[in-house]
């Protein structure tokens, strides 16, 4: 398992010697650094890479654009980046002005190595806490919206069921009153077909509105996925799809509700086959990553457009003529109810990644995955 990259820091100062000193100290601690000679150059770097820097360490007294001017401009366009100002001309007025414009901290030259690193660490810690808070707020709002949407969907689906059953029975009755070739029979058949489409939608609504409380028990994920693959074996042959499976050796059991997870992986495999088309390839791989079991379902075919990717897991979003847009939303709810997560990875190949937590006592060492192929 690779360790996360160290934060990236932009150091801004017109004094070359002091600029090199700061970058050397930060690099010794493992930080990734970039340099700029004045505020305008620093602002240009932030504009070019809006998510590239975690923190800026900037001098105040510089030509072209000084530190306070840079601070005001950066706060407007890049509020997520923490900024620490430094100067050889300390004073209460400069400190108050820097803090008023949104600087995280203010340090006076000359400063010690420990003083610099302490200020940097505090700034990075504040940024991490801010990001975690925003993520928690976003997740809370999403969950509240999904709960309200689920309640409404369940209510609507239950209200629709009885009228749909009546319409279906009436259309089936009418169908028996006309001979084949009679256009009135064709109308009755069309009504029946549309009602069955609506019936499927109501089932999806009800399934989405469920409060998922999985019955967890240790399950062998390799056995489960091989069972899922077997259900698609005839379809794979008909479509002439090359199916590859990769299972790491010694996979531990995973606590899961087998029925629910079979539905999830069956849905992901079904979607993948539909998107692959004739003569493509589909792969399912399972490995151990840290404390998680990782399952990747990948397929060839047309790439998913960026505007579609960002909405795929949203309820009722669909690109299919007869889809309800609830399949992936339901899959995510089931996976999250198991303490896991699902994501669509970047890349030319379409890959959905599911991560499920392993029992704490299991060995989490990552092992290579042997390959087996099915025609």
Image: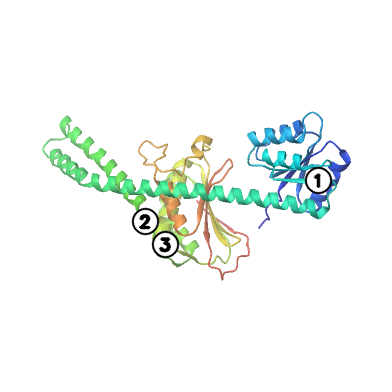
User: Which label number is shown at residue 258?
Assistant: 3
Q: Is residue 45 visible?
A: no
Neighbours of disc 1 within 10 Å: few (<14), some (14-19), many (20+):
some
Mark in the foreground, 3 or 1: 1
Find disc 1 in the rendering and name its residue: 108
Mark in the foreground, 3 or 2: 2
> Which residue is nearer to you in this view: 337 or 114?
114
Tell me the SS state at disc 1: strand
Q: Is 20 on the left-hand or right-hand side of 347?
A: right
Can you give x and y, in whole percent of width and height, for residue 16 in the image? 87, 38
> Which residue is nearer to you in this view: 345 or 29?
29
Q: CA distance from mark 1 to mark 2?
A: 56 Å
Find disc 2 in the rendering and name its residue: 211
* Mark positioned earlier in the residue sequence (1 or 2): 1
Q: CA distance from mark 3 to mark 2?
A: 17 Å
* Mark positioned earlier in the residue sequence (3 or 2): 2
> Which residue is nearer to you in this view: 45 or 104?
104
Extreme residue in the front direction: 92
Residue occupying image coordinates x 26% and y 38%: 194
User: Which label number is shown at residue 343?
Assistant: none
Q: Is residue 299 above or below residue 319?
A: below
Tell me the SS state at disc 2: loop
Can you give x and y, in whole percent of width and height, for residue 354 in the image? 51, 53
Q: Is 178 on the left-hand or right-hand side of 145?
A: left
Can you give x and y, in whole percent of width and height, for residue 275 in the image? 46, 41
- Looking at the rendering, in which quadrant would you find the N terminus? bottom right
Can you give x and y, in whole percent of width and height, for residue 348 in the image? 58, 40
Extreme residue in the left direction: 177
């Amino acid at each position: 398992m690779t360790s996360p990259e160290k934060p990236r820091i932009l150091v801004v100062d017109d004094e070359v010697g002091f600029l090199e000193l700061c970058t050397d100290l930060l690099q010794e601690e493992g930080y990734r650094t970039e340099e700029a000679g004045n505020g305008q150059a620093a602002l240009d770097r932030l504009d070019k890479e809006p998510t590239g820097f975690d923190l800026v360490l900037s001098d105040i007294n510089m030509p072209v654009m000084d530190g306070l001017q840079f601070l005001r401009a950066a706060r407007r366009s890049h509020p997520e980046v923490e900024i620490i100002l430094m100067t050889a001309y300390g004073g209460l007025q400069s400190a108050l002005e820097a803090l008023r414009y949104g600087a995280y901290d203010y340090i006076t030259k000359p400063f010690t190595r420990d003083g610099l690193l302490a200020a940097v660490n505090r700034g990075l810690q504040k940024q991490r806490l801010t990001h975690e808070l925003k993520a928690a707020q976003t997740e809370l709002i999403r969950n509240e919206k999904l709960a309200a949407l689920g309640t409404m969907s369940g209510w609507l689906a239950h209200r629709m069921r009885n009228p749909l059953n009546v319409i279906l029975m009436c259309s089936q009755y009418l169908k028996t009153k006309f001979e084949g070739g009679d256009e009135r029979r064709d109308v009755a058949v069309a009504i029946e077909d549309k009602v069955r489409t609506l019936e499927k939608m109501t089932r999806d609504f009800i399934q989405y509105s469920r409060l998922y409380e999985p019955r967890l028990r240790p399950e062998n994920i390799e056995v489960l996925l091989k069972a899922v693959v077997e259900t698609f074996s005839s379809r794979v042959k008909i479509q002439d799809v090359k199916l590859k499976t990769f299972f790491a050796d010694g996979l531990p059991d995973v606590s899961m509700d087998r029925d629910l997870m079979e539905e999830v992986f069956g849905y992901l495999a079904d979607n993948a086959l539909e998107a692959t088309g004739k003569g493509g390839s589909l792969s399912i791989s399972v490995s151990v990553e840290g404390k998680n079991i990782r399952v990747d379902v990948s397929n060839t075919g047309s790439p998913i457009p960026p505007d579609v990717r960002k909405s795929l897991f949203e309820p009722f979003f669909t690109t299919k003529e007869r889809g309800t847009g609830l399949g992936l939303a339901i899959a995510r709810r089931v996976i999250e109810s198991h303490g896991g997560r699902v994501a669509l990875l970047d890349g030319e190949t379409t890959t959905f990644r599911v991560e499920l937590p392993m029992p704490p006592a299991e060995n989490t060492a990552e092992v290579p995955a042997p390959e087996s192929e099915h025609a």
